[in-house]
Image (cartoon, grey):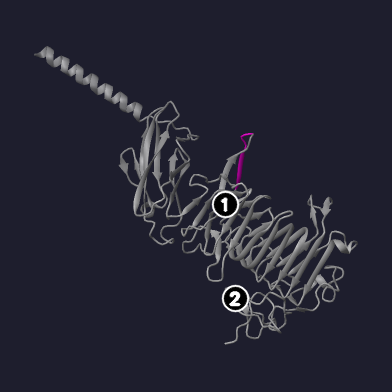
Amino acid sequence: MKKIFSYLVVGLLGSWLLLNGCRKIDDSYYEGQEAMLEFSTDTLRFDTVFTQLGSATRILKVYNPYKEPVLISRIYIPEGTSSKFRLNVDGVPGNEITDVKIAAEDSIYLFGEVTIDPDQPLSASPFIINDEILFETNGNTQRVVLEAWGQNANYIPSRFNKGGVALLSCDFAEVTWDDPKPYVIYGILVIDSCTLNLPPGARVYVHGGIARAYDENEELIVYNDGLINVFPKGRLNALGTLEEPVIIQGDRLEEGFQETSGQWVGIRLAGKDNVFEHVTIKNSLIGVLVDSAAQLTMRHGQIYNTDGPGLIGRHGEIEAVNCLFYNNGDRSVQLGFGGDYDFSYCTLASYGVDAPALSLSNGICYDLLCEEFDIYRLHANFRNSIVFGSRADEIVLSDFTGGQDPFSFVVGFDHCLVRVRDLLDPDDGGYPNFLFEQCNPCINADFGDPIFVDPNEDDYHLDTLSIAEGQALPLPGILLDLEGNDRDPATPDIGCFEYQYQ
């Protein structure tokens, strides 16, 4: 019996030593401050488009690449319990887990879950729901993006295209986005050898942000995502009506984001015969770029809430009628490198911006000092339009020939309301006869003159006492204003809005 007891004591002692030895190993962790975990993916995407209330689960594998155990001091979602996402780390539920151990050269599983109700308003369930999981290890913080689709929509070109480029091509035929559900562009959409038609009432939401990719040399490229790029053989027609306009904007529609600029890049047109009617473009970096040899006809359009210029013409061709440009972070309209431009009954309003509402140029510089440049013929005509804002000069003219070739810089303003001062200085602006030659007849207004109802509230209807009333020239074929109101047949008003007498 004593012999058996001795064996038991020895066995228990050995087990105790073994257990304590294992515990000592488990409690010894890799302490390098450069410690970095590895993940099975950098973005956990819940790619289900829900048509009703539903949940989805995705798996993330977290690797310890070291020959010693690591201790993750904290795994959490910054939004905490208010997040639509939920975590389970190796069987432990919660959106904040502490002291998670991974054995040497081993891994753990993390389960992410999301519940979506697509019938909730966009303010509660936006098109694209983003959050992140943060991992804190030895003082380092790493993140994995969480992404889910909060609405039942058409995601173009696919739900996996963040930061990617997708081609819409139809062998020179036409594609019409006529589904009553909205369209969400997720990535960069290239239109080539195809015409994309946006019918009345179409809603296009573009998801932008910082994207990363690698070039052919495996060099990291960081750029802004969310772009509609129409190639030379492509065409984009946005054909809304007064009652059902086409709206192209960012996808952040929650409270506080509806009017935020810079959410996506914008629209680049390189093809001919693009037509925009009753269209609103907003909340982008730029509105529309009409690139070399491209054509755009825009009637009854609005471009506003942009970080940069609203409309850019670069050796292009633009016809704009009854259009409104405002709240642009740079020029409302920037026309450079030559081109052919015709604006009728348009309003360019620029307040609180350190840039003019309109700039016109017939050249392009290739260096900072503009010692190398090219010149292309510019022909720009403005009729019955307002170019006004908070600067003393809301028009900038840049003739790269210095007036030596008058046929390369042809600019005219007819029955327009403008604001210029330094432009008239022969030494500074260089156009002392602007109000007699390029702008005749015109109204050169001052900041205190009554023009708009309330620019502070972005209300650019004409004030009751507006000096733009009855000062325009009737133009054949343009009988209505931006809102479908009749133009006075004899003495219409300048700008995109006709004053409405009560």
Q: Quadrant of the C terminus?
A: bottom right
Q: Residue at x 60, y 44 (%)?
A: 222
Label 1 crowd (10 A; few <14 / some 14-19 / many >=20): many
Q: Name the residue type under label 2.
A: Gly
| Residue found at the very far left of the displayed protein | 1
Q: Earlier in the sequence, mark 1 or mark 2?
A: 1
Count of marks, rendered view: 2
Q: Which residues are magenta?
A: 217-223
Q: Are marks 1 and 2 in contact (CB under 8 Å)?
A: no
Outermost top residue: 3
Nearest the camera: 350 or 410? 410
Amino acid of disc 1 = Gly
The x and y percentages for residue 481 are: 63, 76
Q: Residue 298, how many percent across, how many down?
A: 65, 65
Determine whether the residue tagged by mark 2 lies in a helix, strand or loop.
loop
Q: Pointer 2: what residue?
A: 484
Q: Secondary structure at mark 1?
A: loop
The residue that appears at 44% across and 60% down in the rendered structure is 122
493 in relation to 411, above or below: below
Between 239 and 493, the one lying in front of the other is 239
Residue 221 colored in magenta in the image = yes
Residue under numbered circle 1: 226
For the view shown, which residue lies furthest in the right direction? Answer: 404
